[in-house]
Amino acid sequence: MRYFLLATLLFLFSTCKENAQNLSSEKNDIEKEQLENEKYIGEEPTSPEATEVYEPIPPKVTLNNGVPSDAIVLFDGNGFDEWVHTADSTAVQWHSNADGSMTVKDKTGNIQTRRNFGDMQLHIEWKSPAVVKNEGQARANSGIFIQQRYEIQVLDNNDNPTYPNGQVGAVYKQSIPLAMASAPTGEWNSYDIIFHAPKFENEELKQPAFVTVLHNGVLIQDHFEIEGTIQYIGWPKYEAHGKAPIVLQDHQDDSRVSYRNIWVREL
């Protein structure tokens, strides 16, 4: 009889312990479900944990002379390895300067990157010649073509007005810049360009391209929805495409624009 009572007590203790564990597990599940509801169903959070996430952990990026460690350096004055002439993919003929910059060699044609890019953060520095020549669109005219199609205008507009959707910092013929933030003629400017490529499905546009531009640290294009490829004459239009090169323009009018410190981060 004594052993029967002991066995019964052990059974009851084990059952109670299991029930307690089940209740604890159910409580944890309920609390977890409540936490998920607070996070994703829109209920007002009731704990700090409801608004905390721990993944993904952002990768660490360091700077080396202002260049992010995850950037692709396209030009730092050490040659044109990353570039070719657009017309025939031959070696670049533009001038390589002792100060680590390059200058358009008039009437040799555009140059472009060997690599193709999609979404990106692009940093590029440029300057017009110190000696002023020409007026309007013929003064230090060049351009940065993202994916060969979408141009951010380079131009010396200091005391040199032109049509605003074609001035320095414009998305050419599409978007007037929010400000004219140019450095004095002959001094270096910087562009920081955030570009999100268009998306296509079965040759049909599903999402247009967007661009943000800072000129010398000043916001001049604010997530502008690009209307299509740049057209000198006619309306912009989209054509289905994938990743494509960055192009620097030779405007064919003795522009003598110089470039330096070009790097890109793929997004």
Image (cartoon, rainbow, N blue to C red):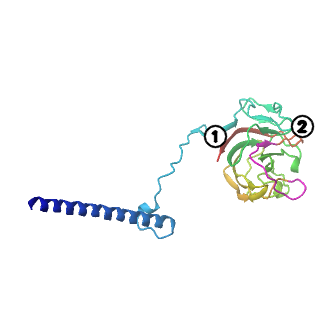
Query: Seen from this angle, which residue lies furthest front?
Result: 1
Q: Is 266 above or below relative to 80?
A: below
Say what secondary structure mark 1 lies in: loop
253 is within the stretch colored magenta: no
Screen quadrant of the N terminus = bottom left
Quarter holding residue 131: top right
Residue at 76% across, 52% down: 169
Is residue 188 shown to the viewer in this render? no
| Residue that mark 2 sits on | 107
Q: Nearer the viewer, residue 78 or 256?
A: 78
Residue at 79% across, 42% down: 247
Query: Seen from this angle, which residue lies furthest bottom?
Result: 43
Residue 115 place in picture, x, y as percent: 73, 39
Is residue 87 shown to the viewer in this render? yes
- Tag 2: Cα neighbours inside 10 Å, few (<14), some, or many (≥20)? few
Label 1 – label 2 distance at C-alpha = 31 Å
Query: Seen from this angle, which residue lies furthest left?
Result: 2
Residue 150 place in picture, x, y as percent: 79, 51
Q: Which mark is residue 62?
A: none
Residue 126 place in picture, x, y as percent: 75, 42
Type of amino acid under label 2: Lys
Type of amino acid under label 1: Ala
- Tag 1: Cα neighbours inside 10 Å, few (<14), some, or many (≥20)? some
The prevailing secondary structure element of the residues shown in magenta is: loop
Say what secondary structure mark 2 lies in: loop
239 is within the stretch colored magenta: yes
| Residue that mark 1 sits on | 71
Magenta-highlighted residues: 231-248
Q: Nearer the viewer, residue 85 or 131?
A: 85
Q: Nearer the viewer, residue 193 or 176?
A: 193
